[in-house]
Amino acid sequence: MASLFLCTDQPHDLAITFLNSQNIRGTMKIALFGPPGAGKGTQARYIVEKFNIPQISTGDLLRAQVRAGTDLGKTAREYMDKGALVPDGIVIGMLEERIKEDDCKDGFILDGFPRSISQAEALKDIVTLDEVVNIVVDESALVRRITGRRMCKCGATFHIDLNPPKKEGTCDQCGGSLYQRDDDREETVLNRLKVYRSQTQPLVELYKGVGILKDFDGNRSIDEISSDILSYLSK
Ligand code: AP5
């Protein structure tokens, strides 16, 4: 905590807000933490199914803008292709708009936000988190997980060896064609991990310090991890 507080202008305010905001368990405003490839997106789908709350992935929102060819998407792409964080001015506004939507009334899962001290500070003015689920994975496994990942437009995620689809190249859920994300090349992945360590990892200590973050061992099977997370969130 102490070193983290040196990084921000108003650390005290931030900590107090979190401490005052320990909602009764049962509300479902969750953030999923973990380095690139930890399994946030994979686990989010189980939580969505069980608790019927939406997953808000800032990465997915940005990729939708890139695909649509908007100005925002063009700017975001310059950062994403390098594995850098997209500027707060773009991401925070986008997140705020999404959270205002009707389906977020009873809760949501933030996947990939907040990712820096400045984003955590902005978030506290928008909404109060109930739980932070932190998926902890050995770094040696992450590059393999990400470079072998295959995605579907429906949101499903697979891995060519670790979590293969029943039919190669085809989504089990909707039959769509699987593709590889542009930023899943090894050199970009290494930079994403570096950015995670320097800008996002400090948030783990922050949220742990105020008592709303729980670590989950992400070095196990997808089913074992989801079973743990779901039973923790059900308490
Ligand atoms: P984003 O899309 O958020 O990517 P990320 O955080 O790097 O996380 P990933 O999607 O790579 O990994 P994941 O943890 O979801 O893993 P998954 O479940 O897919 O961000 C992309 C970019 O957008 C950023 O670099 C940045 O530029 C920008 N961005 C996004 N949010 C931003 C923000 N807030 N601020 C600024 N910029 C932002 O699993 C990975 C693979 O492993 C899959 O193949 C899966 O099948 C497999 N797998 C999962 N679990 C297991 C397991 N237990 N065992 C074996 N394999 C597993």
Image (cartoon, rainbow, N blue to C red):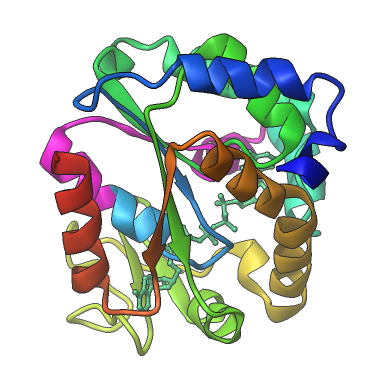
Residue drawn at the location 70% of the way across and 58% of the way down: 196
Above-or-below relation of 161 to 180 = below
Q: Is residue 142 visible?
A: yes
Residue drawn at the location 28% of the way across and 84% of the way down: 168
**Observer-nearest of 54 and 203:** 203
Residue 170: percent from the left, percent from the top?
A: 27, 72
Q: Is residue 91 visible?
A: no
Residue drawn at the location 51% of the way across and 70% of the way down: 180
**Observer-nearest of 189 and 63:** 189
Query: On the image, which quarter does residue 224 sit in?
Result: bottom left
**Is residue 95 rendered magenta in the image?**
no
Query: On the image, which quarter does residue 179 sit in?
Result: bottom left
The quarter of the image holding the C terminus is: top left
Q: Is residue 56 left or right of residue 80?
A: left
Magenta segment boundaries in residue numbering: 45-71
Residue 131: percent from the left, percent from the top?
A: 38, 36
Label the magenta part by its dominant secondary structure: helix
**Is residue 55 rendered magenta in the image?**
yes
Residue 227: percent from the left, percent from the top?
A: 16, 62
Residue drawn at the location 33% of the way across and 19% of the way down: 23
The quarter of the image holding the N terminus is: top right
Above-or-below relation of 101 to 22 = above
Q: Is residue 38 left or right of residue 223?
A: right
Residue 82: percent from the left, percent from the top?
A: 81, 59
